[in-house]
């Protein structure tokens, strides 16, 4: 994809163009609720919701946070906010009060669209804990000096909205006050190089950073991704991956809309629900992290389902075991399954395999550079490009790179050099044919089942425990999730702390995927002569101590 081949179109205009071309084809079909829309009906509904946001006081440049699973309101909010030039701020569904407060404050979000909660997490309770005066406020008039931008909450649920919140169903009625002329003038004024989405990812500071992605970023990346899978209006994609990640938003939603491909979302991943949706809707594709595919393959009812309509999909989000890739091809009929590699900062795909690549490449590599994206491997010490087969840091440059981290200019400069190259921190090799293979990470980011976990964030929180003197959080290999979190703890002199106490402390304040699977109480950490802790030695020790050699030996792409 050359520069002049890139689509110069906003997310809103893209949806309108698909609705014009295929007005009566099905755009979205849920199997667990009464929600089906053609492209025309969906676009019209998006317009009504967009007008509702305008009537609420949300305008161009405002930040709209959404905290929900893959419900219809999520995808409606995505396109409605895009049509009025607002920025969608995606919230991890596993967040608790500590993380939600940080995101809402750092992102300057003006409104939070939310569901009641998920099993074990009441979002309404968390919001009321964070915003105790909300229940005494009029909807749209919330005031909190700690969250100065936040004014409104929109509740998506079948019951009445909690005190202080608008109900989702009110949006369309509110939007009747906005004229078609005013709405059209606004949508026509937008530029595709403006920011449309902010996604939070962990970084070297130990706290999440807001990645600013433009219409141009995500539309063109989605287009390239769909091209690699040969998507058309005849395809149907089952989407069990969360919308709040680039996997759901770009690799799934944008890849589908750019190709007029029907979407079959699953509210939250459940292997049985995914298999039912694939069979019932005759899906031709399904996305997932390796853990999701393993969950289906190992489900006791797996052989009862018909996967004959499946053709393709993406396995990504964490290193993909070669054995699992082969099983999915053989047992789920996904002969044309693909792998994508990238980062949120690259919106996200940098490389990808294609449906017609040889099987050995699709099973054991992450493919070649995406059209319009330059990739190279450099020596981490010298910064010089290395040749085929030599391990180094993976770097990328192109239309897909973020505008930067929100309000973090220094961190942006550290991620993208003066020549425009994104330094991923991942170790990789490339062969003579341009196929890349990810071999490790320079940074010690943990990727558990597709979730990026930065150890420093957990470490800094554990340091607040009165009995802990020092802590190191590492990733250890896992057959199921790729990696698991392990906390290595040195207690304060005279203090004792148990494994369960550490887990409970993290669990009560942070998202589930950040809770350590393993805890080791130690007297000291391995260090260099200069006093730097050697995390790789901790990891090697953990593999030996916990007998994780089999998991560590799994070959990945």
Image: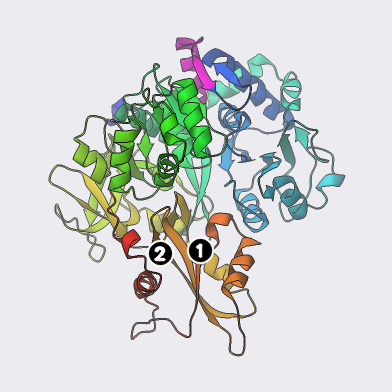
Closest to the observer: 75 or 500?
500
Crowding at dot 2, Cα within 10 Å, few <14 / some 14-19 / many 20+, comes out as: many
Q: Does the magenta stretch include residue 130?
A: no
Q: Quadrant of residue 113?
A: top right
Q: In which quarter of the image is residue 219?
A: top left
Q: Is residue 17 magenta?
A: yes
| Residue 82 pos. (x, y %) | 55, 30
Dot 1 lies on which element?
loop
Instruction: Give the answer, above or below, for where 137 lies relative to 413.
Output: above
Q: Is residue 4 left or right of residue 172?
A: left
Closest to the observer: 332 or 209?
332
Which range of residues does the magenta coloring cover? 10-28
Asked whether the viewer can see residue 58, the reply is yes
Closest to the observer: 374 or 283?
283
Marks 2 and 1 close (CB-CB < 8 Å): yes
First along the sequence among labels 2 and 1: 2
Q: Is residue 176 left or right of residue 286?
A: right
Give the residue displayed 29% in from the left and 46% down from the top: 323
Residue identified by numbered label 1: 517
Give the residue displayed 76% in from the left and 26% down from the top: 170
Q: In which quarter of the image is the N terminus?
A: top left
Residue identified by numbered label 2: 476
User: Which label is found at residue 29?
Assistant: none
| Residue 358 pos. (x, y %) | 19, 35
Q: Going by the picture, which residue comes out furthest to the bottom?
A: 494
Q: Is residue 307 left or right of residue 385?
A: right
Instruction: Give the answer, above or below, for where 398 lies relative to 552.
Output: above
Give the residue displayed 56% in from the left and 42% down from the top: 90
Spatial CA span between label 2 and label 1:
9 Å
| Residue 508 pos. (x, y %) | 66, 62
| Residue 555 pos. (x, y %) | 27, 53
Dot 2 lies on which element?
strand
């Amino acid at each position: 994809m050359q520069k002049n081949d890139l689509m110069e179109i906003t997310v809103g205009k893209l949806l309108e163009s698909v609705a014009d071309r295929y007005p009566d084809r099905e755009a979205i079909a849920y199997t667990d609720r009464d929600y089906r829309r053609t492209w025309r009906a969906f676009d019209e509904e998006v317009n009504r919701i967009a007008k509702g946001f305008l009537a609420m006081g949300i305008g161009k440049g405002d930040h709209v946070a959404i905290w929900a699973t893959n419900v219809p309101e999520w995808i409606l909010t995505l396109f409605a906010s895009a049509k009025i030039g607002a920025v969608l701020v995606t919230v991890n569904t596993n967040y608790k009060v500590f993380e939600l407060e940080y995101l809402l404050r750092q992102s300057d979000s003006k409104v939070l669209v939310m569901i009641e909660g998920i099993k074990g997490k009441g979002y309404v309770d968390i919001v009321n804990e964070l915003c105790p005066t909300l229940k005494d406020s009029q909807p749209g008039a919330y005031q909190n000096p700690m969250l100065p931008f936040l004014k409104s909450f929109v509740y998506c649920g079948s019951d009445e909205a909690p005190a202080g919140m608008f109900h989702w169903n009110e949006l369309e009625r509110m939007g009747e006050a906005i004229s078609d002329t005013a709405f059209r003038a606004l949508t026509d004024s937008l530029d595709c190089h403006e920011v449309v989405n902010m996604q939070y990812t962990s970084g070297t500071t130990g706290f999440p950073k807001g990645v600013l992605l433009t219409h141009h970023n995500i539309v063109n990346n989605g287009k390239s991704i769909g091209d690699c899978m040969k998507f058309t209006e005849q395809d149907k994609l089952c989407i069990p991956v969360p919308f709040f990640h680039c996997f759901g938003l770009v690799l799934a939603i944008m890849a589908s809309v750019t190709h007029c491909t029907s979407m079959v979302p699953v509210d939250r991943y459940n292997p049985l629900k995914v298999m039912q949706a694939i069979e019932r809707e005759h899906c031709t594709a399904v996305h997932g992290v390796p853990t999701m595919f393993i969950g289906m393959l190992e489900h006791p009812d797996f052989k009862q389902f018909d996967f004959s309509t499946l053709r393709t999909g993406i396995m990504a989000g964490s290193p993909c075991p070669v054995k699992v890739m082969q099983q999915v091809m053989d047992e789920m009929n996904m002969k044309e399954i693909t792998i994508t590699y990238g980062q949120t900062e690259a919106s996200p795909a940098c490389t990808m395999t294609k449906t017609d690549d040889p099987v050995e490449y699709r099973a054991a590599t992450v493919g070649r550079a995406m059209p319009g994206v330059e990739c190279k491997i450099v020596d981490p010490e010298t910064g010089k490009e290395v040749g085929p087969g030599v391990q180094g840091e993976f770097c990328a440059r192109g239309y897909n790179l973020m505008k930067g981290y929100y309000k973090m200019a220094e961190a942006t400069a550290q991620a993208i050099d003066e020549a425009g190259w994104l330094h991923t921190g991942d170790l990789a090799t490339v062969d003579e044919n341009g196929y890349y293979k990810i071999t490790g990470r320079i940074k010690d980011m943990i990727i558990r089942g597709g979730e990026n976990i930065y150890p420093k964030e957990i470490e800094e929180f554990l340091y607040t425990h009165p009995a802990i003197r020092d802590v190191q959080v590492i990733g250890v290999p896992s057959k199921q999730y790729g990696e698991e979190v392990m906390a290595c703890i040195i207690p304060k002199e005279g203090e004792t702390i148990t494994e369960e106490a550490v887990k409970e402390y993290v669990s009560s304040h942070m998202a589930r995927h950040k809770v350590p699977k393993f805890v080791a109480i130690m007297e000291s950490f391995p260090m260099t002569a200069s006093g730097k802790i050697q995390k790789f030695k901790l990891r090697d020790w953990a593999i030996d101590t916990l007998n994780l050699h089999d998991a560590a030996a799994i070959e990945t792409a």
